[in-house]
């Protein structure tokens, strides 16, 4: 920087020049994901001082060429947040995430990269039937939070070779 003095409409010559190098933003640290399910996971990172926002990248490759839609510099503006749940993930698939800090118009370097493998879809548990009648019954099972729908097979034999018409892979 340099300084000039102003006195009565007169400006002095420039002062000597001093070079100042400001410190860079600290690089954040991505932590291992938790709350991993078949279709989601929670990305985590260490809290950083002096943050306007965190920027989260999620991809299906560790080079971040194939970004998850909506997760290329996903801005997390609550600076006290150190987690973000990534939903609509694919079952049994590896994802990669990294984080960086935004402070005003400055950005940190990217954090380390974390990988997370979503779990396989657990199988539902069949419960005893209810409302058993001569020609019908109500099938029951445990609810799976990740499931969008269910498919049911009904057969007249234990090996499921004699399927009841309309009840093979029925939704």
Image (cartoon, rainbow, N blue to C red):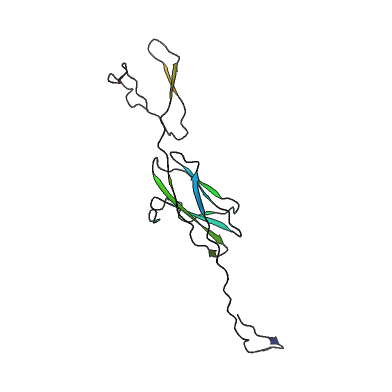
Vertical arrangement, residue 33 with respect to residue 133, above or below: below
Left or right placement of residue 133 versus residue 78 in this view: left
Residue at x 61%, y 82% (from the top left corner): 2
Q: Where is residue 28 shown, x and y percent of the image?
A: 53, 57
Q: Quadrant of the C terminus?
A: top left
Tell me residue 18's x, y (percent).
60, 81
| Residue at the (56%, 57%) spot, across then down | 53
Quadrant of the rendering where the N terminus is positioned:
bottom right
Foreground residue among 91 and 47 = 47
Where residue 144 sits in the image (x, y, percent)? Answer: 46, 31
Q: Is residue 11 left or right of residue 147?
A: right
**Picture layout, residue 42 above or below residue 3:** above
* Location of residue 103 with respect to 148 vertically, above or below: below
Direction from residue 127 to residue 48 in the image, left or right: right
Residue 47, image quadrant = bottom right
Q: How many marks can you see?
A: 0
Quarter of the image holding residue 16?
bottom right
């Amino acid at each position: 920087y340099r300084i000039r003095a102003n006195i009565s409409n007169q400006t002095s010559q420039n002062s000597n020049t001093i070079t100042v190098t400001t410190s860079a933003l600290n690089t954040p640290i991505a932590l291992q994901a938790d709350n991993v399910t078949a279709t989601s996971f929670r990305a985590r990172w260490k809290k950083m001082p002096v943050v306007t926002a965190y920027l989260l990248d999620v991809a299906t490759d560790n080079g971040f060429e194939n970004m998850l839609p909506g997760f290329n510099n996903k801005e997390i503006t609550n600076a006290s947040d150190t987690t973000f749940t990534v939903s609509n993930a694919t079952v049994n698939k590896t994802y990669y995430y990294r984080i960086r800090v935004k402070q005003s118009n400055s950005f940190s370097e990217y954090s380390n990269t974390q990988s997370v493998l979503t779990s396989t879809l657990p199988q539902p548990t069949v419960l005893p039937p209810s409302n058993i009648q001569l020609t019908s019954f109500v099938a029951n099972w445990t609810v799976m939070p990740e499931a969008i729908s269910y498919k049911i097979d009904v057969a007249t034999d234990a090996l499921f070779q004699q399927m009841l018409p309309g009840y093979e892979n029925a939704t």
